[in-house]
Image (cartoon, rainbow, N blue to C red):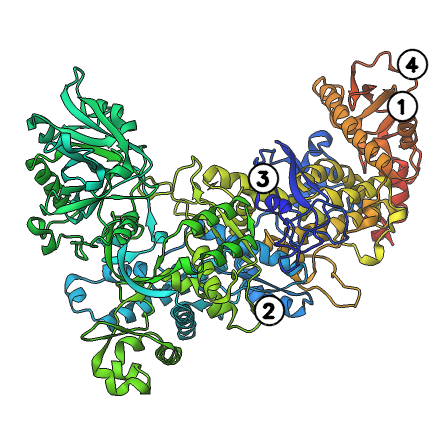
């Protein structure tokens, strides 16, 4: 579904009484159904984004739905020229294309279309001109100031200021802008403050990469911070220019940057509020650690690439004793009894403190027998390496989960005979010998994380290297050993492995040691998901370190309740963030980096006890508000401490940790929404990519619920990622990266990568099903460009044919021909893709050309048609404005008349014009009339088919050379059609609708006049009533002016080559020759 089709099913983000959303009625056509209601976030009973009830009178967004891209002909707008070939219509086409006109006696009596609005967008020139027009006139501010509705706040999620923009940025910012511009037209006071995330490792790495080795060694923290700040600000300036080129409106003069002092101070305030409530603590526990970045990482800073292969092992630990309460359960198997474990991180074995079992699982003692005939099970290219434990030990008993005996027997290729079974609870407090340290360790009861899905059912437990291990370790008082340094190398605590890298040679050394000690059963590669540092793209480890944490457990329930109060689109997003919040562990908020907001804590130089209270935090907040966070680095401890602690300054030192950047951006509700004039918290809407469920959406939720007890947003929309046309992730190595700048400005090869402009890019955004991953590439862009070009052609046609129209010329609705009333009904119900490009172009525009060009400048039928065209023009320009603002404004600036409100004020810009109001009278077009015109359209299609056959057979050239004969079995329909043959006005005449010279309804197929007709066909209209269609040459002679055939040609001595209608037109106009004589 497209962006606005999805909105049609979910209403809270847009105005309560809004209707007209694009919904596909078939795979190949698009129809916009009239809708009437929706709800806003600030209402007490929010409903879905757009309810489908026809209750209110305010019109809502109708947008292009192009889930199935258009493949129509580029000549659609001039379809009639294929049938008429020359004459006024062809002259109009030539005029529109700037071609020289053929001389003709009556050419000055023809009202050809006129407009300065170009057929070609010339977007690289015109769009910047329009943007300058907006900037020079401060249109965004001007519209906001004039609007009288309530405020609408879409809070911007800050992108990292660390590089050029990609298609994900374009998708995100344009979606936001479409909503904001729509809300502007709906009379809301829209407040949109763009923001940037300016701290953190991505920017720090960019700075470090720009320096040579000597410069890096001489780099001081302050110098690094200065360079990082400059890099971030330069990037913000570059990205801002790109966002503005996308056509995105916002408060660009006052964006929020997380490096601004006032922002940093607000962040410190949030941290303090959480600390005062007991939600911030310092502890030693395992966290995701990136050896490549040398810092702790949050879950949101990890990625899990495909294809990671770990070295997994099956190892054995020798059991030396069982508790006295076991009743001699295992005594018969001593001293040859071992615990069998499986791990994908052999390097954690030195930190082993216990082996955990599941109390409820059944375990077995198995005796290892002779090798099986077929040997170890091996799949694919996996390489299994049997350890010495199976090769050299003559008698061996192993404890494994009963359910895994068969699988292990096949994998190891050894006969396993069950000797005894028991529950895991019976193994608690058994003791085994540590395979490296040689000390005794216990068997403990773990949790439900111990299963029989893989491994042996027994889990090697290292509390310093795993979250479940840590929790189990706390329960049993196990030591939290983590003999690994910041670089990922073993420390001296690891003994013989000291200095080896745990992800490399250290891992191998541990495996080799186990094998030498006859403790290795098997080594094999294991492919699985493994956490990588999302910045360096290198593997991480779990490592226990002293860190600062936010105790999510302390406010988890409040966060869960807050989630339930938020409107999530798509709806399944709610389940996703609920699952993430309910299962997440405490949030590690400290980072061992320089470029960031400092954790405002002092440590006692001897006891290492932290000093952090309300006085110290308030004092530091005040300093940072004035001087920025650099003050933490250039001011002394004495200067940073409040007066109360100055005399003890020598006993303390500043902490060196900075805050997680997700805490930075997660505090934006406090730093922006609660601090800026005109903004309020919670915001109406947050809109970001689906990855932000574990990122900004969640960090914002946690900080807000911890301090305010509620979510900082009323609604959340998420979108997917942008992939290439084949559904592949974009990669420079694959050469499939689509650059938004190249889409707008064109690539180096303009033939292969033409400049489409921002509006085509925005059109693509509106067309995709943003709730999942979306595709883009050359073919998609060509399709979007084709649709844009056709829509532009429609608007150009409208502009050109109302060049001499004024509001005073409006024909009252009751006096309009029925065909015009039907067109206005369609305007209210079916708009944009299907209507503007197909129904309007192929039907209404096609038949309107005759009366517009040759019907007479001031004739009733021309004025009535112009009334309809003006209504369409004003509606279409405003309806497309949120998606295609440059095109809409270009149209508005080329209006041949002013758009004036009832109070006399003029809408100088399209976004001052307000959303089109629902016209209930147009919608009241009778159902029987709707049904009748559906039949007319169907009949016209069938008539065209017969005309085409007659043209192929050389009976006629253009359709105006034809007369159509109809026999209709339905007498009521036949009577209605007969009346249309002699309609009171030219517009409703049946031959004008068919674009033929005559139409005759015959009562019987026995009519002698039709016996010789060669080209004929029968069909069932709407599958019920039989209609016979015949085509013959038209009667009479051809009119020189309109090319219609008529018996009246030759009847007027002054103008012998004209038909009656054309005679009436020219007789009141002065021809050039007459003017010359006079």
Residue 1001: give its label. 1
Q: In which quarter of the image is the N terminus?
A: top right
Residue lying at 29% horizontally and 71% vertically, measured from the top left: 226
Q: Where is residue 465 in the image (x, y as percent from the top left)?
A: 23, 50
Which is more toward the observer, 580 or 957? 580
Residue 66: give its label. 3
- Do we see residue 60 in this rendering? yes
Give the CA separation, mark 3 to mark 2.
32 Å
Q: Is mark 4 on a helix, strand or loop?
A: loop
Which tag is nearer the camera, tag 2 or tag 4?
A: 2
Quick check: marks 3 and 2 in contact, CB under 8 Å? no
Q: Is mark 2 on a helix, strand or loop?
A: helix
Instruction: Provide the residue designation for mark 2.
Output: 141
Instruction: Provide the residue designation for mark 4.
Output: 1007
Which tag is nearer the camera, tag 2 or tag 1?
A: 2
Q: Where is residue 592 in the image (x, y as percent from the top left)?
A: 26, 63
């Amino acid at each position: 579904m497209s962006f606005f089709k999805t909105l049609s099913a979910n209403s809270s983000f847009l105005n309560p009484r809004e209707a007209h959303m694009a919904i596909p009625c078939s795979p190949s056509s698009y129809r916009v159904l009239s809708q009437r209601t929706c709800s806003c976030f600030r209402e007490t009973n929010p409903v879905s984004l757009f309810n489908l009830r026809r209750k209110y009178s305010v019109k809502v967004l109708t947008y292009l739905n192009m889930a199935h891209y258009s493949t129509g002909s580029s000549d659609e707008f001039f379809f009639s020229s294929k049938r008429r070939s020359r004459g006024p219509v062809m002259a109009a086409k030539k005029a529109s294309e700037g071609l020289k006109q053929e001389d003709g006696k009556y050419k000055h009596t023809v009202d050809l279309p006129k407009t300065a609005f170009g057929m070609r967008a010339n977007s690289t020139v015109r769009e910047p001109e329009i943007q300058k027009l907006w900037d020079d006139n401060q249109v965004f501010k001007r519209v906001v100031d004039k609007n009288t509705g309530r405020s609408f706040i879409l809070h911007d999620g800050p992108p990292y200021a660390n590089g050029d923009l990609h298609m994900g940025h374009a998708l995100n910012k344009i979606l936001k802008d479409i909503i904001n511009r729509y809300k502007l037209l709906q009379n809301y006071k829209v407040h949109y403050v763009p923001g940037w995330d300016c701290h953190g490792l991505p920017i720090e790495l960019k700075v470090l990469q720009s320096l040579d080795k000597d410069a890096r060694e001489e780099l001081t923290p302050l110098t690094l911070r200065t360079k990082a700040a400059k890099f971030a600000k330069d990037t913000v300036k570059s990205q801002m220019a790109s966002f503005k080129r996308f056509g995105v409106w916002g408060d660009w003069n006052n964006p929020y940057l997380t490096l601004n002092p006032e922002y940093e101070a607000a962040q410190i305030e949030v941290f303090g509020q959480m600390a005062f409530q007991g939600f911030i603590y310092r502890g030693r526990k395992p966290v995701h650690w990136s050896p490549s970045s040398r810092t702790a990482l949050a879950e949101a800073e990890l990625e899990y690439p495909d294809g990671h292969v770990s070295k997994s092992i099956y190892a054995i630990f020798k059991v030396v004793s069982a508790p006295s309460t076991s009743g001699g359960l295992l005594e018969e198997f001593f001293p040859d009894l071992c615990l069998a474990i499986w791990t994908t991180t052999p390097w954690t074995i030195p930190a082993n403190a216990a082996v955990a079992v599941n109390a409820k699982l059944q375990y077995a003692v198995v005796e290892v027998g002779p090798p099986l005939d077929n040997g170890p099970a091996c799949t694919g290219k996996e390489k299994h390496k049997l350890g010495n434990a199976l090769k050299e030990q003559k008698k061996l008993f192993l404890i494994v989960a009963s359910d895994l005996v068969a699988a292990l027997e096949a994998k190891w290729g050894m006969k396993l005979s069950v000797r005894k079974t028991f529950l895991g609870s019976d193994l608690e407090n058994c003791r085994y010998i540590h395979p490296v340290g040689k000390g005794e360790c216990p068997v403990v009861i773990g949790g439900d994380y111990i299963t029989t899905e893989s491994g042996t059912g027994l889990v090697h437990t290292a509390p310093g290297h795993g979250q479940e291990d840590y929790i189990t370790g706390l329960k049993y008082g196990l030591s939290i050993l983590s003999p690994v340094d910041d670089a990922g190398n073993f420390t001296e605590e690891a003994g013989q492995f000291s200095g080896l890298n745990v992800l490399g040679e250290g891992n191998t050394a541990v495996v080799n040691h186990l094998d030498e000690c006859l403790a290795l059963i098997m080594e094999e590669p294991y492919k699985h998901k493994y956490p990588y540092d999302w910045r360096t793209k290198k593997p991480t480890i779990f490592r226990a370190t002293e860190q600062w944490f936010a105790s999510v457990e302390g406010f988890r329930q409040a966060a869960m309740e807050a989630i339930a109060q938020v409107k999530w689109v798509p709806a399944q997003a709610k389940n996703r963030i609920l699952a993430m919040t309910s299962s997440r562990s405490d949030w590690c908020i400290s980072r061992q980096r320089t470029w960031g907001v400092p954790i405002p804590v002092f440590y006692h130089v001897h006891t290492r006890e932290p000093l952090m209270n309300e006085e110290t935090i308030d004092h530091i907040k005040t300093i940072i508000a004035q001087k920025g966070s650099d003050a933490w680095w250039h001011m002394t401890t004495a200067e940073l401490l409040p007066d109360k602690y100055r005399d003890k300054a020598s006993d303390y030192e500043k902490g060196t940790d900075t805050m997680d950047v997700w805490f930075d951006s997660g505090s934006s509700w406090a730093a922006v929404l609660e601090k800026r004039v005109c903004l309020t918290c919670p915001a109406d809407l947050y809109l970001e990519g689906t990855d932000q469920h574990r990122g900004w959406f969640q960090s914002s939720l946690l900080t807000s619920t911890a301090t305010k007890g509620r979510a900082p947003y009323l609604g959340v929309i998420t979108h997917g990622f942008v992939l290439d046309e084949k559904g592949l992730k974009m990669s420079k190595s694959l050469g499939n990266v689509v650059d938004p700048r190249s889409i707008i400005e064109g690539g180096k090869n303009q033939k292969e990568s033409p400049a489409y402009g921002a509006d085509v890019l925005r059109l693509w955004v509106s067309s995709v099903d943003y709730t999942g991953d979306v595709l883009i590439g050359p073919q998609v862009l060509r399709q979007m460009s084709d649709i844009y070009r056709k829509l532009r052609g429609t608007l150009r046609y409208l502009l050109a044919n109302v060049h001499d129209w004024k509001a005073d010329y409006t024909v009252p609705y009751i006096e309009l021909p029925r065909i015009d009333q039907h067109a206005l009904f369609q305007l209210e119900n079916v708009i944009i893709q299907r209507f503007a490009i197909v129904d309007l172009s192929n039907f209404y525009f096609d038949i309107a050309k005759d009366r517009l060009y040759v019907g007479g400048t001031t004739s009733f039928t021309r004025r009535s048609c112009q009334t309809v065209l003006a209504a369409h023009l004003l509606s279409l320009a405003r309806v497309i404005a949120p998606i295609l603002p440059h095109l809409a404004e270009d149209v508005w600036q080329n209006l041949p008349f002013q758009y004036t409100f009832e109070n006399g004020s003029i809408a100088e810009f399209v976004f001052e014009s307000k959303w089109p109001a629902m016209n209930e009278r147009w919608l009241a077009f009778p159902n029987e009339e709707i049904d009748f015109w559906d039949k007319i359209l169907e009949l016209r299609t069938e008539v065209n088919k017969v005309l085409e056959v007659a043209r192929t057979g050389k009976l006629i050239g253009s359709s105006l050379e034809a007369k159509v004969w109809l026999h209709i079995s339905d007498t009521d329909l036949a009577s209605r059609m007969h009346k249309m043959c002699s309609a009171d006005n030219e517009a409703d005449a049946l031959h004008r609708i068919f674009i033929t010279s005559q139409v005759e309804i015959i009562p019987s197929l026995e009519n002698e006049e039709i016996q010789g007709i060669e080209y004929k066909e029968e069909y069932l209209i709407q599958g019920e009533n039989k209609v016979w269609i015949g085509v013959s040459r038209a009667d009479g002679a051809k009119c020189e002016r309109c090319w219609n055939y008529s018996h009246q040609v030759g009847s007027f001595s002054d103008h012998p080559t004209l038909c009656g209608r054309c005679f009436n037109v020219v007789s009141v106009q002065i021809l050039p020759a007459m003017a010359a004589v006079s």
